[in-house]
Structures are given as structure tokens and as C-alpha cells.
Image (tube, rainbow, N blue to C red):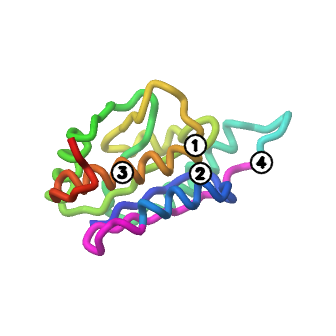
Amino acid sequence: MKIQLIAVGTKMPSWVETGYLEYQRRFPKDMSLELVEITAGKRGKNADIKRILQIEGEKTLAAIPKGNRIVTLEVTGQPWDTHQLASQMQKWQLDGRDISLLIGGPEGLAPECIAVSEQKWSLSNLTLPHPLVRIVVAESLYRAWSLNNNHPYHRE
């Protein structure tokens, strides 16, 4: 199974890239984690946020391979603890499709992205910095994989 993390935003600070890559490289070949970055629209004093979200949404949807299960990361989504995420991961594997996890920009995801989502996942009730979300998602997925595979990374 391939897990695709589609995130709005490019040119992340080095600590974000380092943190994300640390977990991405740990995944086995039969469950890869791939990052696809979507260029964020210019946000200025008089920016048309609705139009920017629409363009980001179009780019995000275009990056999703046909047939993938779409999971959006949203504050209003379902919170999963590590065991619940591990269970979700097993269900995703049994489903036989690859996964696209969508992370929005500063204003969140475009309504079009939310509309096609099969699941909504909330990392926290807090609004997290979007660069940090990449690292938290990568680590959480790796921890869930390690739990499912009796790998020593996850210790209870």
C-alpha cells in the first residue's frame, strides 16, 4: 500500500524536512509514504481567499491518483488514538487501495476536497502549524505500522 501525503505549502524550514524524512525513510517497501507538495496561493492584504482555496483545491484533487481512498485532516474530523489509527491502517490495507491524506493550507482545505473525502481525521482540537502536521502524521503512521507489525518502536 502506498500512503500519499498531499500538503499545501512548499519551501518548508529544514527542521520540517528533516523530521518528515526521518519517519518516511523508516517505512518498509510494501508500505511507502510519499509527500506531494501543492504550491500555496499568495496571501496578501487584499487576497481573494475563496479563489485561492479553490485553486489549491483543484491542484490537490489533480494530485490524487484515480481510485485512491481520500482522507482529509481536519479539526472537525475523527480523533484516533494510536491503536485506532493502527486499526484504520489495517482496514485500509484490506481495502486494497492506496491512500491520499490531504492537508490544507492556512485556511484549511477547499470545500471540494472535503466533499470527496471518505474519512476525516483530526490530530487534535488545537489548530496545529501546517508544517508540523507533516511530521506528526508521518510519525503517527509509522507508530501505527510498528504496532501492527510488532516492531519495537511502539512500546506500551
Residue at 49% x, 50% y is: 135
Q: Residues within 10 Å of mark 3 (few under 14, many from 20)?
A: many
Residue under pointer 4:
42
Three-letter residue code for mark 4: Lys
Q: Residue tagged by mark 3?
A: 70
Residues at marks 4 and 2, CA–CA distance in whole angstroms: 12 Å
The x and y percentages for residue 73 are 43, 40
Question: Circle 1 is placed at which residue position?
Answer: 130
Q: Distance of mark 4 from mark 1, alpha carbons?
A: 16 Å
Nearest to N terminus: mark 3 or mark 1: 3
Q: Nearer the viewer, mark 4 or mark 1?
A: 1
Q: Residues within 10 Å of mark 4 (few under 14, many from 20)?
A: few
- Asked whether 24 or 125 is in front, the reply is 24
Marks 4,2: beta carbons within 8 A: no
Which residue is labeled 2 in the image? 8
Quarter holding residue 85: top left
Kindly identify the residue that appears in the image at 83 percent across and 39 percent down: 44
